[in-house]
Structures are given as C-alpha cells and as structure tokens.
Amino acid sequence: MRKTIDTREAILERAVDLASTDGLEGLTIGRLAGELEMSKSGLFGHFGSKEDLQIATIERAGRRFIGRVVEPAYRSTPEGAERLRALVNGYIDHMAEDIFPGGCFWAAASAEFDGRPGPVRDAVKDAMAAWLAELERQAEAAGADDPKQLAFELHALAAGANQRYQLFGDPEAFEHARRGIERLLG
Amino acid sequence: MRKTIDTREAILERAVDLASTDGLEGLTIGRLAGELEMSKSGLFGHFGSKEDLQIATIERAGRRFIGRVVEPAYRSTPEGAERLRALVNGYIDHMAEDIFPGGCFWAAASAEFDGRPGPVRDAVKDAMAAWLAELERQAEAAGADDPKQLAFELHALAAGANQRYQLFGDPEAFEHARRGIERLLG
C-alpha cells in the first residue's frame, strides 16, 4: 500500500510540472503515461478519468505551494504584519524561483478554467479562495484598516508581476511588485 | 474590394469574441466557419493558416480596445494625470462591461501564449507592450516620481481585478481596484 501511495505521489508531482507548462487541459492520461514510461491502463488504475487527474493535480500543486510558501512563513514569523509580508514575498519568490516550471500555477489555472464551470474550476476556486482568505486573515491580525482591500492589492501586485515576467521574461517586474508591497506594508 | 474588406472585418469581429471565450488555440478555421455559416475554403481565402487568423484576431482585438478605451480617454482628457486615470478606469470598465465576452482579452491571451515562442506570442507581446508604454508615457507627463513603477502598479491592480472577477464572478474586485488606483493617483 505504501508503494501505491508513493507511486501516486510521484505521478502527481510530474503531473503538476506538466500542467504548469502545458495547461491542465494538456494533461492527458496518454501524455502523462508517455512521460512516466507507464502504461495508460496503469495510470487509469490511479485516476479513473482525466477530470479526476486534473483535480488531484490541483490538490497536489496546492500542497507543493503550502510546503514552499505558506509553511516557511508560518515557521519564521508571528501572526500579523510580519507573516503577511513573508507570505506575499514568498508568493513572489515562488514565481521567480520556478517552484512551478511554468510560473504561477494559480494564475495559469485560473485563466484556463475561469470560463468553464465544473469540478475542475471549483478546485481552482477553492485553492485561490483559501490563499486570499489567508492574506485577509493576516491583514486583519496586522490591524489593517481594510483587510480585504489590502489583501486584494497585495495579491494583485504579485499577480501583475507574474503576468509581466511570463510574457516579457523581465525580472524587473518582481522588483516593481516588491516596491509596491513595501509601500503598502511599510 | 470594399465587400471583401467588410467580410474580413465581420469575420474578425466574430473571431475576437470566440477567442475571448474559448482561447486563441480554440479558434480553428473549421470552428469559425461553422459559427459564420461559411465554407472552410472561403475562410482560407481570407486567412492562409490558423496562425494568420490568430494574429489578425489579436490585431482586431487591439483595434476594438483602442476604439473603446484609448480613443475615448484621448478625446475627453489632456495628457498627464487625467488621461492616465481615464485610461486605467477605461481598462477596468472594459472588463466589467464585457467589451470582450470572456473578460480581458490580453490577460487571457498572455496566459495562453506566454510559454509558446513564435509570431502569435509576439503579437500579444507587442499589444501589451504598447499599452504599458502608453501608461508610462502618461505617468511621466503627470510628473510621477517613478513612471515605470506607477504604470506597473496601475496595470497590476486592473489585472488583479480581472483575475478575481473572472474566477469568482464578484464585481467587488473592480471596486477594490478603483480604490487602489485612487490611492495611487489621488
């Protein structure tokens, strides 16, 4: 059973990378089987359908993000302003450092699925909503006048940097975002 | 000849709407022919390839955007702070008012093509670069300390609102963006 779980995790790690560069829709069981040198029927044993695979991939991307961005911020800072800064700067680091090879997984998945109602879009919405709620919670603990407004602006600066970096390849976008974040939090 | 031009324009208007909701990659000549009740060979007479059609569609989306956002700002405001505000608020209006049925054409096209080098991505980059340069020019005319930084932040707030609105359908995102813009320009 342990081996089955390990195999599933290894499959999903590869699936996250593939979806990050080629989109969730490009993540077919055939394509993934080819990449992993597994049989399609072997993969179907882990995931019953493409939709199941897409949803499991989004969940896995969420765990990777939590492990690389959220948990380090929780370990190194107390609740409030410091944790808010650590989370948002961690979000920018995750774009610059390519935790996901195609840039921000959430921006790409949002753009791809926002017009397609269904369980895949719901999984993207749940992940994004959890992130925005976490920013709002920390903004509130930091004593912000309008925590929702602050969380919106912080996230927008980070998302703007990702869009700009992905399209133009210019890392100056991250500096612009960091400067805007310091102005908001400073 | 006039008729050929009119037909081409009508085709491209429909192509912009289709690409806006289904993506530029979903814009096949067969699909578009079906929507317009034209023959595929008739469409091939206007566009030699899918790539030609994608690039012409991006150019057409640019003209629609200029007609609905940039020209009204130029007609109603002098160069500088007022025009900058009119441009950015026009950008937000264009998302809320669905000039493009799938939300911001540029955000969607960026996310779709930023990882795919080639002439389609170049057309998206050219359009986005022209928009950002226009914001920087007006920020400079407005006497901003750091015009590039201001242009980055204004665009990021608008792009953040689009992402949020498209995924969650919550128009409050536009209010957040407008509040952030007023704080930057006020």
Image: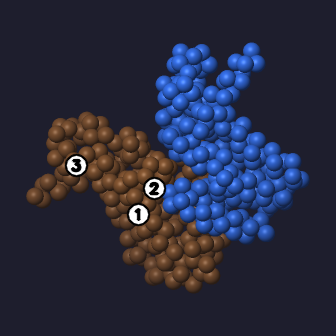
Chain colours: A blue, B brown
Mark nearest the camera among 2 and 1 is 1
Residue at 34% x, 42% y is: B27
Q: How many marks?
A: 3
Q: Indicate the amino acid at tag 2.
A: Trp
Q: Indicate the amino acid at tag 1.
A: Asp
Q: Of residues B149 and A168, which is closer to you in this image?
A: A168
Give the residue at mark 3.
B47
Give the residue at mark 2.
B106
Q: Quick one: SS at disc 2?
A: helix
Q: Of residues A59 and B4, which is closer to you in this image?
A: A59
Q: Indicate the amino acid at tag 3.
A: Phe
Q: Of residues B52 and A5, which is closer to you in this image?
A: A5
Work out whether mark 2 precedes mark 1 in sequence or the reverse, and give the earlier one. Answer: 2
Same chain letter for marks 3 and 1:
yes
B15 displayed left or right of A113 = left
Dot 2, how many residues are within 10 Å of its Cα: few (below 14), some (14-19), or many (20+)? Answer: many
Residue farthest toward the front in the current orientation of the protein: A37
Residue at 36% x, 55% y is: B119
